[in-house]
């Protein structure tokens, strides 16, 4: 699902950006994301997920690829563009000045969420919780949070 020709969310649209950890958790629990909500991922998140398929058991690769393709069909996938790069550079500089380190992929994901104005759903609150301006969201997990 491409939100617009530029790959950016339509102005005023609201959704939740998903971190790799959330999607892996849903895959392991064999559950689906809620249908009534809008979700997106960054291109680097897509790469992390695809990397997992390629690194996994070759006998299950086709099955896992098909499952991942099915999930990604219903997600907006956001490219790293100049607007996001500007947010990324500011975050990177601010964190460096404060003596806080963050992973390169995590910063791209955080900058995308901030640029979109969307919260980020992640299981890695320790890494993402120290990024200023980033709103975190906890998704209810149907297999655990009943």
Image (cartoon, rainbow, N blue to C red):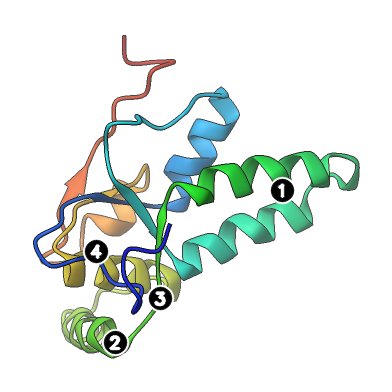
- The residue pinned by badge 1 equals 65
Tell me the residue at 28%/33% (across/down): 139
Which residue is nearer to you in this view: 13 or 137? Answer: 13
Mark 2, other Cα within 10 Å: few <14 / some 14–19 / many ≥20 = some
Q: Within the image, what quadrant is residue 133 found in?
A: bottom left
Which one is closest to the eye, mark 4 or mark 1?
Answer: 1
- How many numbered marks, from 0 up? 4
Residue 85 is tagged as: 2
Above or below: residue 141 compared with residue 109? above
Callout 2: SS: helix
**Dots 4 and 1: beta carbons under 8 Å?**
no
Q: CA distance from mark 3 to mark 2?
A: 10 Å
Comes first in the chain, label 4 or label 2: 2
- The residue pinned by badge 4 equals 113
Comes first in the chain, label 2 or label 1: 1
Q: CA distance from mark 2 to mark 1?
A: 29 Å
Give residue 35's position: percent from left, percent from top. 35, 31
Which one is closest to the eye, mark 3 or mark 4?
Answer: 3
Instruction: Kindly give the residue lying farthest to the right in the view shown.
Output: 59
Residue 79 is tagged as: 3
Callout 3: SS: loop
Above or below: residue 116 compared with residue 122? below
């Amino acid at each position: 699902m491409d939100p617009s020709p530029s790959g950016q969310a339509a102005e005023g649209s609201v959704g939740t950006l998903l971190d790799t950890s959330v999607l892996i958790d849903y895959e392991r629990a064999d559950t689906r994301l809620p249908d009534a909500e809008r979700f997106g991922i960054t291109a680097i998140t897509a790469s992390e997920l695809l990397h997992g398929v390629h690194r996994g058991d070759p006998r299950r690769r086709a099955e896992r690829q098909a499952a991942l393709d099915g999930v990604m069909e219903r997600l907006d996938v956001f490219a790293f563009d100049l607007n996001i790069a500007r947010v990324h550079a500011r975050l990177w500089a601010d964190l460096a000045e404060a003596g806080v380190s963050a992973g390169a992929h995590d910063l791209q994901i955080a900058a995308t969420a901030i640029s979109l104005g969307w919260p980020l759903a992640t299981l890695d609150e320790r890494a993402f919780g120290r990024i200023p301006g980033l709103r975190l969201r906890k998704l209810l997990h149907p297999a655990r949070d009943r």
